[in-house]
Amino acid sequence: MSETKSLFPEKRMRRLRFSETLRNMVSETTLSPDDFIYPLFVVFGKNKKNEISSMPGIYQMSIDNAVRECKEVYELGIPAVILFGIPDHKDEVGSGAYDDNGIIQQAIKEIKKNVPGLVIVTDVCMCEYTSHGHCGIVEDAYVNNDKTLELLVKESVSHAKAGADIIAPSDMMDGRVAAIRKGLDDNGFINIPIMAYSAKYSSGFYGPFREAAESAPKFGNRKTYQMDYRNSNEAVEEVRLDIEEGADMVMVKPALSYMDVIRRVKEKFQMPTVAYNVSGEYSMVKAAAANGWIDHDSVMMEILYSIKRAGADMIITYFAKDASKILKGQK
Ligand code: PBG
């Protein structure tokens, strides 16, 4: 048996933990407001700020209030928002999604006018706009992939026309990145990047979001298009295909139960990698903190740093404002 010699007592790991200054000097991971993208839910109307019961601190806002929120976000040093729209009517083909006068299209224009420096990412999907709540065209209770692509292209082009800076398809149809890239290019939007929700899992953690976006499926689930959480090779393949199709940034979603996937994707492709710290991950922290079971701010910061440590370059998070206030010493 080989002899294993302990380096102790010469070697002491605690030396570099002795003071806060030393700990800061040797820290490996940085976090700043410019790592964040803040999600906003936009509704028609004026002066609306509707609470979302499962997401304390997050609201559905009419465009006037969303613009006010965007100013605050921008002043905190957060560079981008991602917009989700709640239309005034839903139908089988989600026509509100690609209506040039739709909720997102109007919101983009107003935000651009008032906060021109803020980057606007738009979520491209059908589920908020369809009467059945699925992310595409439903035929015999199945989402038809290729017919859905046409609508996603229309939606993307409509967002770009309104002034969106980044298009983020979250539907998980096959071939959508290539189709959207072509649609954008054909319409002259050669410089609008695609942030692909590449490895998007079918997840129970989206529950609160579906209240916020009023987008829960009316029947069944999303398992025929979103990924199975038992797989990670499949995530690598999804990301590879999206990159080949022209994605400029790739995303792993959710974040916390998928840190291994974030790490694999970052190491393998070295692309700008986004993690979506989703609604359920936010609400769990809020609920436990409200009960006094955990300390809100320390758990929030630990989560956000951990997502960066796993390999994410950017984090879409409902905590963006709270965390930025802490990072800027305002709290
Ligand atoms: C739209 C979409 C969803 C989320 C982002 N885009 C919901 C879903 O796929 O059901 C979830 C975000 C969150 O939970 O915070 N398809």
Image (cartoon, grey):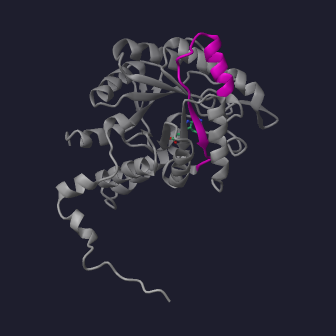
Question: Which is more toward the observer, 231 or 286?
Answer: 231
Is residue 17 found inside the magenta-colored segment of the image? Answer: no
**Rendering coords of residue 116 (x, y %):** 36, 15
Residue at horizontal 35%, vertical 19%? 117
Q: Is the C terminus in the top left, top right, bottom left or bottom right quadrant?
A: top left
Classify residue 298 as left or right of residue 303: left
Left or right of residue 113, residue 160 in this image: right
Above/below status of 185 relative to 170: above
Pinpoint residue 145: horizontal percent, then vertical percent.
75, 31
**The residue positioned farthest toward the front in the image shown:** 2
Residue 109 placed where, x, y %?
45, 13
Q: Is residue 94 visible?
A: no
In the rendered image, residue 329, in percent from the top left (x then y), is placed at: 20, 41
The outermost residue toward the bottom is: 1
The number of discs equals: 0
Whether residue 200 appears in magenta in the rendering, the answer is yes
> Image quadrant of ligand 1?
top right
Horizontally, residue 71 falls left or right of residue 20, namely right
Give the magenta range: 177-203
Name which residue lies at 55% across and 37% down. Answer: 250
Q: Examine the rendered structure and indicate whether residue 103 appears above or below residue 318.
A: above
Determine if residue 266 is in view: yes
Q: Residue at x 46, y 47 (%)?
A: 311
